[in-house]
Image (spheres, rainbow, N blue to C red):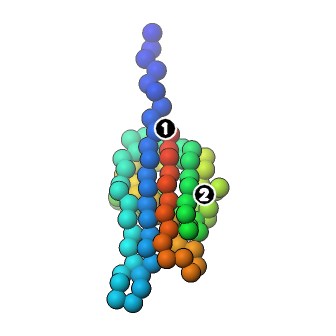
Amino acid sequence: AAHVSEAAEYSIKGKQIRGTPGNNAKLESSPVNIPKEAVIIRCETAGADGLWFQERQGRIIRFDSCDKARNAKISKGVWSVYPNLKTRVNEAGISIVLKD
């Protein structure tokens, strides 16, 4: 019988902290290797106004909201994710789960 491999899930998290005078803005995300095309099944943000994915080679994919990101496909690559800061918010976080 053919072996059916289980679908894999990948979790990517990111953070953005607004700069203040004398203190640079910070982007934090640990890159995750997505070995084949995967679909965004969960997207949760705090203080974010949209988000973007950035691939190690420089490709960028932007979404206006988590609602828009859900069910979107992300191609294989090594991806980080970052939240866009809402106006007057100093820190935002994003958590994404993809499934291949």
Please identify the quarter of the rendering in which residue 8 is found: top left
Looking at the image, can residue 98 be seen?
yes
As drawn, 36 above or below 54: above
Q: What is the crowding at mark 1: few (fewer than 14 residues within 10 Å), some, or many (at least 20)? A: some
- Choose the circle earlier in sequence order: 1 or 2: 2
As drawn, 84 above or below 76: below
Query: Residue at (53%, 73%) from the top-left corner?
Result: 85
Q: How far across and how far down the image is residue 70, in percent?
A: 61, 50
On the picture, is 71 further left or further right than 76? right
> Can you name the residue that lies furthest to the top here?
1
**Label 2 belongs to which residue?**
66
Query: Residue at (56%, 52%) from the top-left corner?
Result: 43
Q: How far across and how far down the image is residue 11, in percent?
A: 44, 47
Q: How far across and how far down the image is residue 47, in percent?
A: 56, 68
As drawn, 55 above or below 4: below
Please identify the quarter of the rendering in which residue 35 is found: top left
Looking at the image, can residue 60 be seen?
no
Task: Give the label, 1 or 2, closer to the camera.
Answer: 2
Q: Check disc 1 and report its element: helix, strand or loop.
A: loop
On the picture, is 47 further left or further right than 16? right
Q: How far across and how far down the image is residue 2, in percent?
A: 45, 14
Q: Check disc 2 and report its element: helix, strand or loop.
A: helix
- Check the picture and name the quadrant holding the N terminus: top left
Q: Which mark is residue 55?
A: none
Residue type indicated by callout 2: Cys
Rounded to the nearest angstrom, the CA distance separating label 1 from label 2 is: 19 Å
Residue type indicated by callout 1: Asp
**Label 1 belongs to which residue?**
100
* Towards the viewer: 11 or 71: 11
